[in-house]
Image: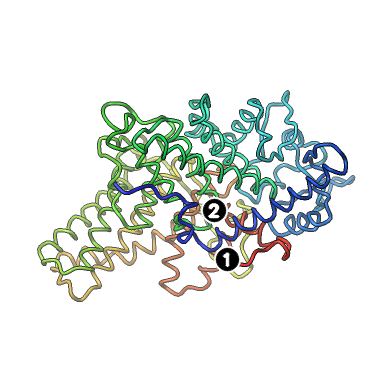
Amino acid sequence: MPNFVFVDQNASKDAAARKRIRSHAMVDFRRRQRQERKSSGKNEQPSRITSNSRRESSGDIGHQRISRMTRFRIVRPSSAGVRSEDTSSDSVLDDESLETGSSGIDRHNLLSSTAIVPLSSRSEERQEDLSLLPGSLTSSWNRVHMQNKFCDLFYPDGRNAIHDLFESIRPVSWAEQLTVNAGDALCTLQVAIIRSDRRMLQASIKLQNMALRRLRDTVNRTGRHQSTDSLIGAVYYLLKWESLMAMSWSSPTWQYHYDALLRLLYNEKSSIGSGASEPPKFLRFTFCYALSMGLVTRRPVHWIPMERRKQPVLISAALEVPSCIAALDAALASQMPADRVQRTITSGLALRSKLLTLLSTYPPTFPGDTLYHLEDISRFVDFDAALSNNVQSLYQQVFSFSSFETAIGLKTLWTSLLVLDQTLLNVHRQPKIDLDAIFTRDFLSLETNIEDWVDKLCRTIPYFTLPSCKFSGALCIMEPLHFVSEYFQSKGSRLHLEWCKCIRDYMVPGHRVARLFEMSDSSDAPTL
């Protein structure tokens, strides 16, 4: 089994944007540290970063630009009850104002364009200052409070895999400190994206670097066969962190961490990944990453043992698609015997028929129910506002689903069918492959079906931008957006590509992060 490849050890594979983000972050963070040390020496007191420290002359201009360009609007009602926009740099969100709406901050207008609901907390609790830098998360209460906020904002029902992870892991040894660093990095990143806060972002990147160093040291010290819940949890946190930082779903960074996660979990010598023991509860949703990675890389999801696939029939069938398209690609690239090519094509068509059958009976518990219906795009205010005038008329009617889980299930089916049908069509168009008449009949409807899957996915994407879908919705956008963009690129449709770009720029978390550093002072920008 090959050795682990961690992100910070293989920078040559990282996208240029990711390297620029990290470089900007560390340069800016060191500059602020020097300023704080100078301030501390003059005042003979340790400097404390509070909301008032945002009034520095250099930072003030940057925050005004960020407020204008990232669409995180701070709206205050005037005395007449009419909302007016305020982009002042000292408009700092505190925990109480986000919960109660004090200080005139409109919660929904503030965060509506992020497709995420605001930070929530119980009314009897007060957070000191959420703009935390590394070293400030020493209070266990602070950490639990941040973790609870993260869970409230990540998944619509608030109870999700990460909530189980936060509850199940308690740091009691040095080895588990890496899990603390990784969890703090993830929570801090989420708040940084919501607030459009560069200092929080720099803190998150520093915590992530600390977690990577500890992870490497732990693996080298204990061996990669000694998997524990805390070690697996740390890699899972880093996987989520990279997902939020990714600017596209084809980014290799989250794939590195997912690969390491599966190697730890299902290693043949691991007590967790072998025998009758169950994997940790917080990993029950990792099949989403497995399928996405298989579809993007066009490789089989071979590292998930079959006995571990206890997902519904829908997911089990979808997980067969990466293996199928890999076999079809091999049939095109190599000189296979004709009978073997036909067997491969027959298997692909059989899988396609299976997926179509599942689609016609989905969900299996309530067949025939109305799963989605068309609604006017005007309901999706933030999504419509993110589009340029040129593309606002493309999809005036979009889908609204009966539940978030239903939307994910149908998105999974439509995406899998889109990739499979495109691969089958490529096989059909190859002149060197002689297909029987029966295959020709099977291929006749592929072109029309591909257009239908693309149309459905484009009408699904706006649903995931609703505030009720939270951060999970923002991540759900990235996979279908990747594949429909590839389709429009192959068709040369500039208008549809512009539509995809508008969504990517304003809805994908990684692009919001990149804009924070694009607006940094030129003096801070390193030479790459």
Q: Residues within 10 Å of mark 1 (few under 14, many from 20)?
A: few
Query: Which residue, given by chain and number where applicable, does mark 2 sit on?
Result: 462
Say whether disc 2 or disc 1 marks the residue closer to the N-terminus: 1
Give the amino acid at mark 2: Pro
Q: Secondary structure at mark 1?
A: loop
Query: Which residue, given by chain and number where applicable, does mark 1 sit on?
Result: 393
- Please, is residue 117 above or below residue 297 in the view? above
Q: Are marks 2 and 1 in contact (CB under 8 Å)?
A: no
Q: Residues within 10 Å of mark 2 (few under 14, many from 20)?
A: many
Residue 438 drawn at (x, y percent): 15, 64
Is 9 or 512 nearer to us in this picture? 9
Distance from disc 2 to disc 1, alpha carbons, whole Å, reads: 14 Å
Residue 17 drawn at (x, y percent): 56, 61
Residue 448 drawn at (x, y percent): 34, 65
Give the amino acid at mark 1: Ser
Residue shown at the point (78%, 42%) measured from the top left: 105
Q: Secondary structure at mark 2?
A: helix
Residue 434 sits in quarter: bottom left
- Please, is residue 192 above or below residue 449 in the view? above
Residue shown at the point (57%, 50%) measured from the top left: 465
**In the displayed structure image, the side of residue 196 where residue 210 appears, left or right:** left
